[in-house]
Amino acid sequence: MEHKSNQNQSLNWGLISTARINRAVINPLRESARNELVAVASRSKEKAQDYASEWDIPQAYGSYQAMLDDPEIDVVYNSLPNSLHTEWTVKALKAGKHVLCEKPLATTIEEVDEMRAAAKETGNHLAEAFMYRHHPQTIKVKELVDSGILGEVRLVIGDFTFSIKSEEDVRLNPDLGGGSIWDIGCYPISYTRYIMGEEPQEVFGWQMSGNSGVDEVFTGQMRFAGDVFAQFDSGFRSPYRSRIEIVGSEASMVIPQPFNPGLEVEIQIDRDGEIESIPMPRKELYIGEVEDMADVILNGSSPRVSMEDSRNNIKLILALLQSAELGKPVLLS
Ligand SMILES: NC(=O)c1ccc[n+]([C@@H]2O[C@H](COP(=O)([O-])OP(=O)(O)OC[C@H]3O[C@@H](n4cnc5c(N)ncnc54)[C@H](OP(=O)(O)O)[C@@H]3O)[C@@H](O)[C@H]2O)c1
């Protein structure tokens, strides 16, 4: 399938919904020479028009499908609530669009497989928007760990929590794919898998469920080959915390802003109390995911977050939720 973009070397993007997270990608799309934000779609025409005028977006559509029917759109950013990711990603792929879909890509393995099959069948590209994975800090941390600066990795500890502001938030709605492990626990899980470069063999989880039934606090353990361990927690009922600690046989490393690195970040390496601070490369956080998408579509490179990677993260989250439900560890094949 030949896209207009392949001739122009510039991609026309449309936003599926007026979600709050859109504002994170609007400036990166504008700053990028190879991407252009041309449209927004909402369930309401009025909402789409108000949003388009607030953010200076040329086109506004009163339904998601209307935007998918526009042949001028090359790529859509799917920022819908989690339970709607699959339906609209598959529709977009089948309408001839490439898709950058928010995390978590889906909440079942069957959905991931359906999305992957639709991408394969149509020849269009799909990637999960794990923005932190594109940031040079993440890549630098992985290089340092792989260089052996900490010795052998023994333990990875991660956390991501915040205090939810509204009881109406989609994150508390089980029908929309709510729950803290899906929303933010997915980050320390993904980070740990990336650092380890492999999948765990066994997991154990506990959760505290809220009134709606979704987990509002989740704490989990993962065991990797060679008895390397990982622990994480996620939650909606504590102040903002975001941190990764990697403990090795020679030293440990603390990354204070692993998922949302700011522009002035240092990581600390602790060797028996002797602290070394290493400044991290600076970069705007969300530019990486839109440039990666352009590389994949225009240059034929592989996406930094592959479908297999997304699938494995989701498989792990499901195993952790199963463990919390059963009250016992779950072995992964
Ligand atoms: N990567 C990141 O840094 C990051 C950060 C935050 C969130 N996220 C992800 O982005 C996605 C959206 O999160 P958000 O907090 O931005 O969501 P949000 O502000 O609640 O927006 C979700 C949008 O989905 C549309 N929608 C369609 N059906 C809906 C329904 N039944 N109920 C509510 N909204 C519905 C609405 O747009 P219309 O009314 O215009 O149709 C709404 O504005 C989630 O998958 C989340 O995990 C990622």
Image: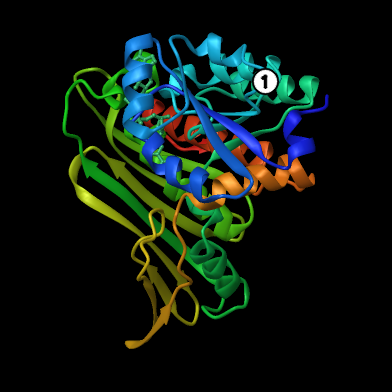
Q: Residue at x 44, y 70 (%)?
A: 247
Left/right placement of residue 250 relative to residue 303 reads left
Residue 175 versus residue 232: which sits nearer the camera?
175
Q: Is mark 1 within 8 Å of ligand 1?
A: no
Residue at the right extreme of this rendering? 1
Residue holding disc 1: 93
Q: Residue at x 47, y 27 (%)?
A: 58
Residue at the bottom extreme of this rendering? 274
Left/right placement of residue 105 relative to residue 7 reads left
Left/right placement of residue 26 relative to residue 310 reads left
In the rendered image, residue 132, in percent from the top left (x then y), is placed at: 48, 52
Q: Is residue 143 above or below residue 90?
A: below
Left/right placement of residue 30 relative to residue 300 reads left
* Callout count: 1
Q: Is residue 92 above or below residue 26?
A: above
| Residue 201, visible in the rendered structure | no
> Where is the C terminus found, in terms of image quarters?
top right
Judged from the image, the quadrant occupied by ligand 1 is: top left
Q: Residue at x 62, y 15 (%)?
A: 70
In the rendered image, residue 220, in percent from the top left (x then y), is placed at: 39, 44
Say how the picture is coloured: rainbow
In the rendered image, residue 5, in percent from the top left (x then y), is placed at: 72, 34
Q: Categorize mark 1 by other alpha carbons within 10 Å: few (<14), some (14-19), many (20+).
A: many
Q: Is residue 134 above or below residue 256?
A: above
| Residue 52, visible in the rendered structure | yes
> Where is the N terminus found, in terms of image quarters?
top right
Residue 246 versus residue 54: which sits nearer the camera?
54
In the rendered image, residue 40, in percent from the top left (x then y), is placed at: 46, 23
Q: Residue at x 67, y 20 (%)?
A: 93
Residue 33 versus residue 295: which sits nearer the camera?
33
Give amino acid for label 1: Leu
